[in-house]
Image (tube, coloured by chain):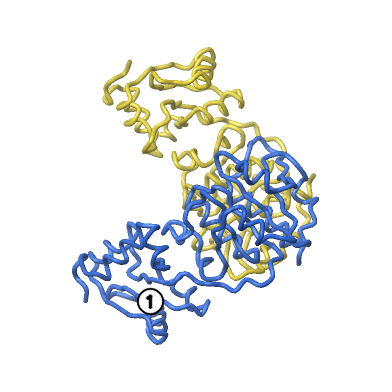
Chain colours: A yellow, B blue
Amino acid sequence: MITSSSNPKIKLVRQLQSKRREREARQLFVIEGVRLVEEVIRAEAKAALVLHTTDLDARAKTAVDHLARLGAQIETVSPSVMAAASDTETPQGLLAVVPFLNFQIRHLSFVIVLDRLSDPGNLGAILRTADAAGVDAVFLAPSTVDAYNPKVVRAAMGAHVHLPIIEAGWEELAKQLTGLEIWLAEAREGEPYDHVDWRRPCALIIGSEAEGPSDEARRFAPKRVHIPMSGKAESLNAAVATGVFLFEAARQRR
Amino acid sequence: MITSSSNPKIKLVRQLQSKRREREARQLFVIEGVRLVEEVIRAEAKAALVLHTTDLDARAKTAVDHLARLGAQIETVSPSVMAAASDTETPQGLLAVVPFLNFQIRHLSFVIVLDRLSDPGNLGAILRTADAAGVDAVFLAPSTVDAYNPKVVRAAMGAHVHLPIIEAGWEELAKQLTGLEIWLAEAREGEPYDHVDWRRPCALIIGSEAEGPSDEARRFAPKRVHIPMSGKAESLNAAVATGVFLFEAARQRR
């Protein structure tokens, strides 16, 4: 059992939790709790390292055994070491270090681009929503919060192992999105979202919560779309707005 | 200028920020920042008390002057007193104590009922969404987080002064919702949400994020509705799901 937070494996986990640079250099990130571990298994992905306390329930034990058979290193840790390794205030007693997945991207027919999204909870909820709505990929334009930030991972509920999540500059996006109709979500300009034909191959750009779309996004996207609002509120939460757009598209595509 | 956190007005604000009991006994709650103060003015509501630091910008000064003309007590406070009175880590230098609004409810044609919602950020985002979608009222069934919790107020972006938000037990709900078609949101049971005729007078019940609807909600609602999901995610964030339902209803009602 690991009982010291200065153990090199624990140090690695702490660095992956706190430093984007470390995550990117090692192409590894951390997931916590049995639900996310089960998503890794369901996605047929692998874990490099699993840490757990001694009080696992049967469901968690099954999941850990599965990852062990696929080659993960398994380490038992003391509760205080788990507290040091965890990003949450009440650790679930189970976490795993997982490699970034490299998805093969063949045909893109429905994608979203996030432009300067800054709130990790919002980004996580958007990834979860995109995963549920069946989008092919999520692109992160410059100045968007890191998708592998632990708060994002927690809110995304497994999207990281189901869905291509790709950082890209605007030039790269121009190449990747060739042939797609590109729509920019605005607060009140452009087409009502339910008048757009989302069955065509398309990309939707969602801008910053506080400041709206960047100048680059405005130059990039010829078409504007908005959600008409009938009440008194002036805007929607970015994740809620994304859900309204994506499920209208999913509804049309069914 | 108030420079001591033991000043009775500051003590009052701190109690209103931290204690549901105090908010309910006094029928008062706290809003922070110029955007929410402007929503109070837009709703033609009043503030009982305004605290601000000396470094207000022109926009905030205009808002404070407006509330002063409507009878609010205005107090200048030191930055450390503002930090003590604020619920946020980076106070905006302006907060107001506002009475609970009593809305006249005449005709209900489209309402939501929240059943054991427990996350303040989710409840706030749902109130903001309901406000934007034009629902007539939001009912809070038993065991739902307090709507006047500062985290809820912050995320709701003014819904508290635009929208009737009503706590009610199931018996009371049965009376209030007489004549409405009652739908319960489920993870995968019942009608697809876009096959429901939301133009009829109706109520939608949204259950707990983690545990789904309560037994009481299941007994209360004869009809079930769900959002078909085409991707790999198993569920949506509660606020995102509410947005998908409410904007489908709003789309049909336009």
Q: Position of residue A123 (x, y in %)?
A: 52, 47
The quadrant of the picture occupied by the N terminus of chain B is bottom left
Question: At 46% from the left edge and 75% from the top edge, which residue is drawn?
Answer: B38
The mark tally for this picture is: 1
Q: Residue at x 50, y 54 (%)?
A: A116
Camera sees residue A251: yes
Picture coordinates of residue B40, whole percent (x, y): 47, 74
Q: Residue at (26%, 25%) from the top-left corner?
A: A6
Instruction: Name the residue located 57 percent from the left edge and 29 percent from the top edge.
Output: A39
| Position of residue B12 in the picture relative to residue A160 (left or right) | left
Pointer 1 local density, CA inside 10 Å: few below 14, some 14–19, many at least 20: some
Which of the 4 quarters of the picture holds residue B33? bottom left
Residue closest to the eye, A27 or A195 = A195
Label 1: chain letter: B
Q: Is residue A143 visible?
A: no
Q: Residue lying furthest top in this view?
A: A69
Tell me the amino acid under the disc marked 1: Ala
- The C terminus of chain B: image quadrant: bottom right
Q: Is residue B79 left or right of residue B49?
A: left
Q: Nearer the viewer, residue B151 or A214?
A: B151
Q: Residue A24 sits in which quadrant?
A: top left
Q: Is residue A73 above or below residue A236?
A: above
Q: Which residue is mark 1?
A: B48
Residue B142 on image: x %, y %: 54, 51
Q: Position of residue B192 (x, y in %)?
A: 77, 46
Using the image as rendered, state which of residue A128 and residue A217 is in the foreground.
Answer: A128
Up/down of A174 relative to B189, above or below: below
Q: Nearer the viewer, residue A3 or A184?
A: A3
**Judging from the image, what secondary structure is the residue with disc 1 in?**
loop
